[in-house]
Image: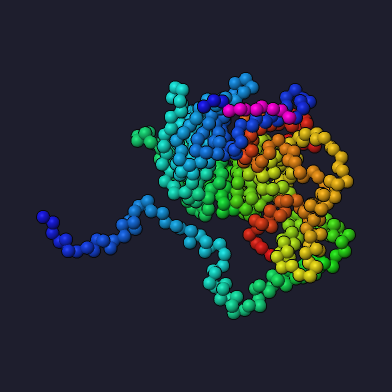
Amino acid sequence: MSKNTVSDRFRKVDVDEYDENKFVDEEEGGENQLGPDEAEVDSLIRQYPSLFTRQHDRAEGLVLKVLSSFKSTDIEKGVQSLDKNGVDLLMKYIYKGFEQPSENSSAVLLQWHEKALSAGGVGCIVRVLTARKTV
Amino acid sequence: MGFQDLRVFNPRPADHEKAAMSYHSFLLEPISCHAWNKDRTQIAMCPNNHEVHIYKKEGSNWNKIHVLKEHNGQVTGIDWAPESNRIVTCGTDRNAYVWTLKGDAWKPTLVILRINRAARCVKWSPKENKFAVGSGSRLISVCYFEQDNDWWVCKHIKKPIRSTILCLDWHPNNVLLAAGSCDFKCRIFSAYIKEVEEKPAPTAWGSKMPFGEVMFESTGTAGWVHGVCFSDSGNRVAWASHDSTVAVAEGGKTAVCASLTSETLPLLCVTFITENSLVAAGHDCYPVLFVYDSNKAALSFGGKLDVPKQSAQKGMTARERFQNLDKKATTDSKEAVLESLHKNSISQISILNGGKARCAKFCTTGMDGGMAIWDVKTLESAMKDLKIV
């Protein structure tokens, strides 16, 4: 004869928690080490909105100005004067510029893109896509 | 199940006694992975499904002699141990099987890898008493046979791997293991198993090698590491990353990674053919040569290894010119046809003769379902600027 059938506390036990083979997603620890703490950065950006993003935008604006000021015929020479890392960096800025097209920027950037492509090859564009540091 | 229609053709004219390369179209689907037996008469490959097919070369034909059916998911890695004649396979069903030839059939033995994601690559160790499996569970399973229980057991290498392991290669000392991962790093781990081997002697990568110890971790390249390879001596390791770079690191020279950013699409596989020369291949569908200069710790591009067919240069009509100009903003028509031997990305490269020190022939398989065999000497003489040091 079974006794003590009144208690049903056992029904509230989550048996899956005790499953040895249960997959525990451990990625949280790893991700935090890679970049700055999201919450911290978020609050800092809110406090000083001008600082962080502006720097990048200003740099991009500057680069765009320089690129536009080149004569079409000089673009090729400009690209030749860069080393491999320079061409990769140039390509990054070109693509960044594509993201926010303004008046005449796309046409100029496309000319630069053509010359940079012949210098850096497809690998250069792949590096823009896979780079961990963006401009 | 009859024989498949296997076409064997040599499109390149035989100016030399031996063709620089030969191509066999096995399938219409990609060849997921392949492995050769010891005397290179048989090749085991996965035709992009759950099976492994073994083909045997008879005369000039490739005949399918075995079909290995046990996996419940795509077979992602095959390795054939030359001395003990055992095949190990791993797949997306999170399992690995060790196959032994009993009479006329291959019999599988399940190996519990204790992973909860797909297995991605597998390699026998040089002494064939262990094998390592890389998986999406962000760890490497090093498996060895336990005599007492008549059973394969495995140990895990977990730290500090943060993403899928895509490729593995063993050091000749049977202990060190190079692993390329999706967390953008190439690492060398110690896979020392005290149950099956003696303590290893010091190497260029270090002298203390407890199981799981990180002997080397790469810096400087971004992108998933698709292919990794130790040189014949084991003192150098090369890896190919998704950011279109190839890099070489030398043990003992701390933190010296020579890397080369290439102009091509990412490379998927890389192997040493001499102590100083590497051959790599990938999404551009042709193998390329790289040369490593140890004194300068620099890597340089050695040349494209695909001798192109002399395609008939037909003149372009004015109409075609304008069409090209309209569609592609250029009158250059050379991009239209892929002139390389492989018509799709090359996913794996393996050494056939000569080992990694003096490779005479290597083989590539790819997503076009074809297998090409490249003869190094003939390639060297066919291409004027090519020099394999």
* Quadrant of the drawing holding the C terminus of chain B: top right
Q: From the viewer's side, name the closer residue of B154 and B46.
A: B46
Number of callouts: 0
> In which image quadrant can residue B58 be found?
top right
Q: From the viewer's side, name the closer residue of B39 and B160.
A: B39
- Residue B213 in view, yes or no: no
Residue B154, given in percent of the width and then of the height, sits at 42, 42
Tell me the colour scheme of the image.
rainbow
Left or right placement of residue B294 versus residue B3 in this view: right
Is residue B264 rendered magenta in the image?
no
Q: Residue at x 84, y 68 (%)?
A: A69
Residues drawn in magenta:
B4-11
Residue that extends furthest to the front in the rendered view of this protein = B319
Vertically, is B14 above or below B197? above
Residue that extends furthest to the top in the rendered view of this protein = B59
Residue that extends furthest to the bottom in the rendered view of this protein = A47
Residue B162, given in percent of the width and then of the height, sits at 52, 54
Residue B117, given in percent of the width and then of the height, sits at 47, 49
Q: Residue at x 72, y 47 (%)?
A: B264
Vertically, is B149 above or below B336? above
- Residue B368 in view, yes or no: yes
Is residue B8 rendered magenta in the image?
yes
Vertically, is B387 above or below B210? above
Left or right placement of residue B199 versus residue A118 in this view: left
Residue B110, given in percent of the width and then of the height, sits at 41, 37
Q: Residue at x 74, y 44 (%)?
A: B301
**Magenta stretch: dominant SS?**
loop
